[in-house]
C-alpha cells in the first residue's frame, strides 16, 4: 500500500445518520487521504436530533477484529469513541498495544450523546490513569473533563493534572468564557489554539470529526500540535458547511 496513504483505525459506534461514530470518522479519513478501517463498538438507533437505543458489541468480537486487522495491516494510529465501560476500553487498548506496540491511540471520551444519553460511568480512578498512561491524546470538552474529577471546579486544573499521563486537547465548544478556544495540554507545555471563525452552525458528531481529523494528521507525520491545529481548521469548515446538524465533508 502507498506510503502516501497511511492506515488508520476507528473503533467506535455506528450512527445510522452518518453524523457521528465510524461513518463520520471514515468520511473524515477520506478527506485527509488516509486509508481508514473501522470496528463497531455499538449499533445505535438515532438521528441527528434524537437518541433512541444502543446495542453494544461484545468485547471478544471487538478484540478479534483488532487482532485480524493488525495482523494484516500496518495501522499507524487508532481512534476510540464510545465504549460501555472503562474495563471494555482497557481491553481494547491492551490488544492494540499487544499487537502493535508503536501504535498511537486517540480517545474521544464520549460521556453523553449530544441528545444527553449517558454512555459511560467512572467508578475507579486507578483504571482511568492506567488507560491514560497508554495513549497519545484524549479530546474532552469542558463538561467531559469535569466528569474525571467532579470535586474540582477549574477545568484547566483538571486537564493539567491528567496531562502527566497523556496529552489533553480541551475543546472549547462548551467553554462559557472563551467559545471555540481549545487548549492543548502536554506534560511539559500548554498551547492555546484560537478559532478562525466567529459564527458557526451546531453540528451532530463534531467531536468525532475533530478527533478523527487529528488521528489522520498524526498518521500523516504531523506532530501533535500541528495535527490539532490543522484538525481545528477542518472542523471549522465542517461547522460552516451548512445550517443543518449534519455537516458536509469536503476539502
Image: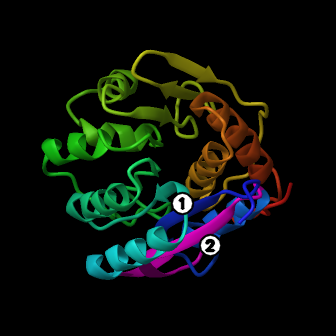
Q: Nearer the viewer, mark 2 or mark 1?
A: 1
- Residue 98 image offset from top left, x and y in percent: 31, 58
Q: Residue at x 71, y 47 (%)?
A: 235
Residue 148 falls inside the magenta stretch: no
- Residue 24 image offset from top left, x and y in percent: 64, 66
Q: How many marks?
A: 2
Q: Residue at x 34, y 65 (%)?
A: 83
Q: Would you name the residue on which mark 1 appears?
A: 75
Label 1 Cα neighbours within 10 Å, binned few <14 / some 14-19 / many ≥20? many
Tell me the element at label 2. Answer: helix
Q: Would you name the residue on which mark 2 appears?
A: 23
Which residue reaches farthest right?
Answer: 251
Q: Is residue 118 left or right of residue 194?
A: left
Residue 43 falls inside the magenta stretch: yes
Does the image show residue 49? no
Looking at the rendering, in which quadrant would you find the N terminus?
bottom right
Looking at the rendering, the stretch of residues picked out in magenta corresponds to 32-56
251 lies above or below 220: below
Label 2, label 1: how far apart the Cα atoms are: 18 Å
- In which quadrant of the rendered view does residue 251 lie? bottom right
Tell me the element at label 1. Answer: strand
- Residue 68 image offset from top left, x and y in percent: 43, 77
- Residue 217 image offset from top left, x and y in percent: 66, 45
Q: Nearer the viewer, residue 242 or 55?
A: 55
Label 2 Cα neighbours within 10 Å, binned few <14 / some 14-19 / many ≥20? many
Q: Residue at x 32, y 43 (%)?
A: 134
Going from the N terminus, do you reach mark 2 or mark 1 first?
Answer: 2
Q: Is residue 69 left or right of residue 250?
A: left
Amino acid at each position: 500500500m502507498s506510503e502516501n496513504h497511511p492506515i488508520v483505525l476507528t473503533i467506535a459506534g455506528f450512527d445510522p445518520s452518518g453524523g457521528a461514530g465510524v461513518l463520520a470518522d471514515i468520511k473524515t479519513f477520506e478527506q485527509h487521504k488516509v486509508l481508514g478501517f473501522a470496528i463497531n463498538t455499538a449499533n445505535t438507533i438515532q438521528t441527528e436530533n434524537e437518541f433512541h437505543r444502543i446495542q453494544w458489541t461484545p468485547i471478544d468480537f471487538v478484540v478479534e477484529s483488532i487482532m485480524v486487522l493488525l495482523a494484516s495491516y500496518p495501522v499507524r494510529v487508532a481512534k476510540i469513541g464510545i465504549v460501555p465501560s472503562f474495563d471494555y476500553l482497557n481491553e481494547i487498548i491492551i490488544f492494540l498495544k499487544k499487537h502493535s506496540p508503536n501504535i498511537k491511540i486517540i480517545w474521544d471520551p464520549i460521556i453523553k450523546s449530544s441528545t444527553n444519553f449517558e454512555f459511560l460511568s467512572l467508578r475507579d480512578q486507578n483504571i482511568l490513569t492506567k488507560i491514560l498512561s497508554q495513549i497519545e491524546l484524549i479530546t474532552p470538552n469542558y463538561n467531559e473533563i469535569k466528569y474525571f474529577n467532579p470535586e474540582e471546579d477549574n477545568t484547566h486544573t483538571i486537564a493539567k493534572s491528567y496531562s502527566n499521563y497523556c496529552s489533553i486537547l480541551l475543546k472549547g465548544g462548551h467553554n462559557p468564557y472563551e467559545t471555540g478556544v481549545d487548549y492543548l495540554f502536554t506534560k511539559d507545555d500548554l498551547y492555546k489554539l484560537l478559532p478562525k471563525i466567529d459564527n458557526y452552525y451546531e453540528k451532530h458528531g463534531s467531536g468525532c470529526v475533530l478527533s478523527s481529523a487529528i488521528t489522520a494528521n498524526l498518521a500523516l507525520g504531523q506532530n501533535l500540535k500541528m495535527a490539532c491545529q490543522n484538525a481545528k481548521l477542518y472542523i471549522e469548515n465542517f461547522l460552516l458547511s451548512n445550517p443543518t446538524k449534519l455537516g458536509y465533508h469536503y476539502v
